[in-house]
Amino acid sequence: MTKYINIKKAQNESWKVYDSWRKTDGINCPAFRSKVRISLLGWRHLIGATGHKKRISNDVYRRLKLLPHVKTIIENSKLVQNIKKKKGRTYYALEGMLEVDENNQKSLRKIRVIIIEDFKKNKIFLSVMDKK
């Protein structure tokens, strides 16, 4: 039961941050020389609300805990780590090595932010993950 409460709490706290980003005109990204838009697409992807796979609660929780690092990675990325085309969509990966707090211990972790390109060539935040 505690885990469920932690996820709901993490989701509520993360939503406040995410929604504040959403209300701006995007996060400036040197790698794209443009702004990355923050939309509901990314939020729904993070919490597993839509798509072909539902996320298990541990995965959702971990991604929500990484969310505060997304803005830092987008703002500081000078190059795109990976570009993948899938079903006519283009996905970009930005990465950063950041200190993550886990179980009250700080550790250096590679965090990957996924950006998707829409048909108008706008860059939109899609996901965040870490290498564990």
Image (cartoon, rainbow, N blue to C red):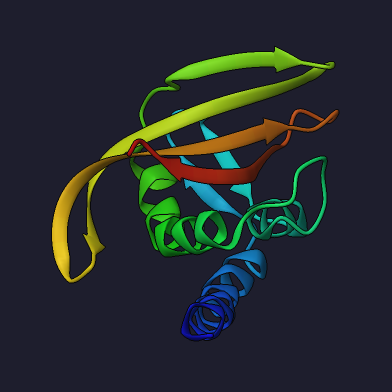
The x, y position of residue 102, in whole percent, is: 25, 62
Where 127 falls versus 24 (above or below)? Answer: above
Along the horizontal axis of the image, is 78 left or right of 127? left
Residue 2 place in picture, x, y as percent: 47, 85
The residue most toward the front is 1
Taking 121 as reference, is 109 above or below it?
below
In the figure, residue 132 lies in which quadrant? top left
How many marks do you count on the picture? Answer: 0
Tell me: residue 69, above or below residue 80.
below
Front-most of 105 and 83? 105
- With 86 as the anchor, is 131 left or right in this view? left
Rendered residue at 56%/59% (across/down): 60
Q: Position of residue 78 (x, y in %)?
A: 36, 28
Quarter of the image for residue 26 reads bottom right
Residue placed at 64% from the left, 44% from the top?
126
Check the picture and name the quadrant holding the N terminus. Answer: bottom right
In the foreground, 93 or 57: 57
Which residue appears at 66% of the width and 70% of the height? 23
In-front residue for pair 78/13: 13
**What residue is shown at x 71% (from left), y 21% (from top)?**
90
- How far across and how far down the image is residue 71, in percent? 43, 54
